[in-house]
Image (spheres, rainbow, N blue to C red):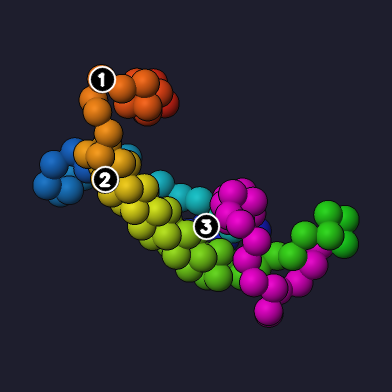
Amino acid sequence: MSGRRVSRQSSSSGGGGGGSSGSSSSSRITDDEMINLISKLQQLLPEIPTSNTRTNRRTNHAKASASKVLQETCNYIKNLHREVDDLSDRLSQLLSTIDADSTEAAIIRSLIE
């Protein structure tokens, strides 16, 4: 099954898409490449809940389904956006309460830059 290829749409099309040349606007990715990418993505995420997962004996690392990894990735990114927004709001509030020429303001500016 590793020889099966999955279509992947190209993000940059060169116009109307009606070209008749031998090159295609989409590329192909193998199942093995997809599995590798999903595995790499899972390694970037905090631990995924382990229901319906299987453990790799060599690494003792639970493997979730590809759909679970993608779902958790979306949730994780949404949470990161919320955290960034919250921290930005808190920083704005903090900066509005201190003197712009104070030592505290200088420290905050140096951390942001």
Q: Which residue is mark 1?
A: 101
Where are the magenta residues, as a range?
36-56
Q: Which residue is mark 3?
A: 5
Can you say whether 63 is above or below 89 in the image? below
- Mark closest to the chain's N terminus, 3 or 1: 3
Q: Nearer the viewer, mark 3 or mark 1?
A: 1
Mark 1: amino acid: Asp
Can you say whether 107 is above or below 3 in the image? above
Is 11 magenta? The answer is: no
Mark 2: amino acid: Gln
- Please state the horizontal and vertical placement of residue 54, each as a whole percent of the image: 76, 72
Find the residue positioned furthest to the right.
58
Query: For the residue labelled by badge 1, is the local secondary structure a helix, a strand or a loop?
Result: loop
Residue drawn at point x = 31 percent, y = 22 percent: 102
Query: For the residue labelled by badge 2, is the local secondary structure a helix, a strand or a loop?
Result: helix
The total of numbered circles placed on residues is 3
Crowding near the residue tagged with mark 2, few <14, some 14–19, many ≥20 C-alpha atoms within 10 Å:
few
Mark 3: amino acid: Arg
Residue 33 seen in this snapshot:
no
Q: Quadrant of residue 12?
A: top left
Residue drawn at point x = 32 percent, y = 26 percent: 105
Query: For the residue labelled by badge 3, is the local secondary structure a helix, a strand or a loop?
Result: strand
Say whether residue 71 is left or right of residue 51: left
Q: Nearer the viewer, residue 38 or 9?
A: 38
Q: Which residue is mark 2?
A: 93
Q: Quadrant of residue 4?
A: bottom right
